[in-house]
Amino acid sequence: MPCVLIACLGAMLLLAGCGGSHTFVTPAPDTNASWVIRNVRVFDAPHASLLEGLRDVEVRDGRIAAILPPGGAASGLAQIDGGGRTLLPGLVDVHTHTGGSAAPPWVTELPAQEENLGAFLYAGVTTVLDAGALTPAIFNLRSRVDARALLAPHLFAAGPMFTAPNGHPIGIMRANLPLFARWYVLPRIAREVATPEAARQAVAELLPYHPDFIKIAVDDLIPNEPRIDTDVLVAIVERAHEGHVRAIAHIGRSRDALDAVGAGVDALMHDVYAAPITAEAVAAIAKAHVPVVVTIGIWDAVEEVGEQQIEKRASITQEIAKPAVLAALSAFPSESERARFREMSKILRESHAARRTNVAALRAAGVTILAGSDAVNIGQFPGAGLHDELAKLVESGMKPGEALRAATYDNARFLVGVGVGVGGDAAFGEVKVGQRADLVLVDGDPTADITAAQHIARVWLNGVDLVRHPRPH
């Protein structure tokens, strides 16, 4: 099994909050949060389709104030001509690691968290869930974002992963981190718990940081590494729920899904990725109404490491990625590295088709599919990774509009707990009166061709127009 989280979590060394060298977005000069955009097609996220005809959308003080027929009254506001383009709600990525790196294992790259956050915005991703990061640094970062002290997507954060002693990601990181870094990183990236009592105590100690979710590693990413005991898993979920926090589970196999759903988790992070999912697991997930963040793209990316063709990468990826990292992903540094990595990734190549049929099986059972990229991780770039994931969802049988709904409306409702008694109505995820004006204007019709969502003309965050700056090559 490949060391997929070395890049994702192992790169989160001592400098997880450090800034990057490229600024992807800046506020437009003299911008304000009140304006009207005319002559746009509007994506109706709940119905996964476009509203009929063109619309004018009025924004006042960073909120959508009206959706009008063309030529509707909007006196005194700055006028923007949408030119018949499509207006989307800002995209939402519910599986990210904002302090990671897309570089392969043979490239050393310090994390550039602020640069990564800017790249998400560049790609039209205006809300993210960080599903595993150094703690408490990630919660301090969330506070900066909430205070608008940093231009970044709206940030939800889970903090550390709960796991068995030496379980994922501890085992893989202990094997790959330099000795001087382990003492700092390991206790901040995960909570190793061996008993129900220790699990309940560890959750209680995290709750004052107000995590948006509690994340639990149920998978053994490296075969035969320790897995969390079911009674410990149940204790974590129960204590999280007592604190009014939902629990999400990193899974990889059907047995993991059964254990996690049986323990009462609220979502699965990853689908079964290395084999066909069992009918028993599908039935259990569906019966419990547990959504699944399937993350097809990250496993495809690992499968392709060392053999990616730069010219075939999406243009939005090439605008975000460092050329040196793209080059490193396209060629192995040696034949021995090629042999080693190909052996580790063999199971992913063999299960390429299964990852798609697994999504189809879940959808056929009525399971809600959520959109998450698992970026920033090996081969998966911030922001661009979500666009890759949308294309993979369409490959798996979802209509383009359904994939877009997953990355907007469904993701937003999941994050705020709509329908499970945790939160109220989402203030994002739709082009709807009263919503935050987190918006993306794209060329073409992404409900007909999902790649049109990559052809971004403008992005707004809280109604503020952002100027996009591709990385120079």
Image: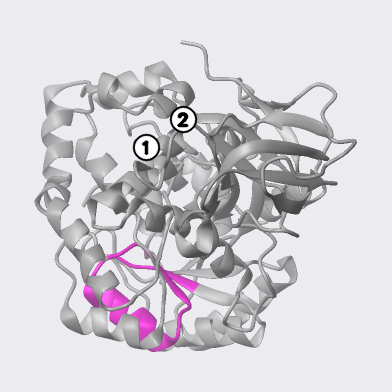
Percent from the top left, x then y, of residue 468?
Answer: 61, 24
* Residue positioned 17% across, 80% down in the render: 279
Q: Which residues are magenta?
A: 248-271
Percent from the top left, x then y, of residue 55?
Answer: 63, 45
Q: Is residue 234 left or right of residue 302?
A: right
Q: CA distance from mark 2 to mark 1?
A: 7 Å
On the image, which quarter does residue 122 sit in?
Answer: top right
Vertical comparison of 49 with 450: above or below: below
- Give the labeled residue for mark 1: 451
Report the front residue among 357 and 404: 404
* Residue positioned 32% across, 55% down in the render: 399
Q: Residues within 10 Å of mark 2 (few under 14, many from 20)?
A: some
Percent from the top left, x then y, of residue 439?
Answer: 63, 43
* Residue positioned 28% across, 59% down in the render: 221
Percent from the top left, x then y, of residue 298?
Answer: 32, 47
Label at residue 455: 2
Kind of residue sitting beneath label 2: His
Q: Are marks 2 and 1 in contact (CB under 8 Å)?
A: yes
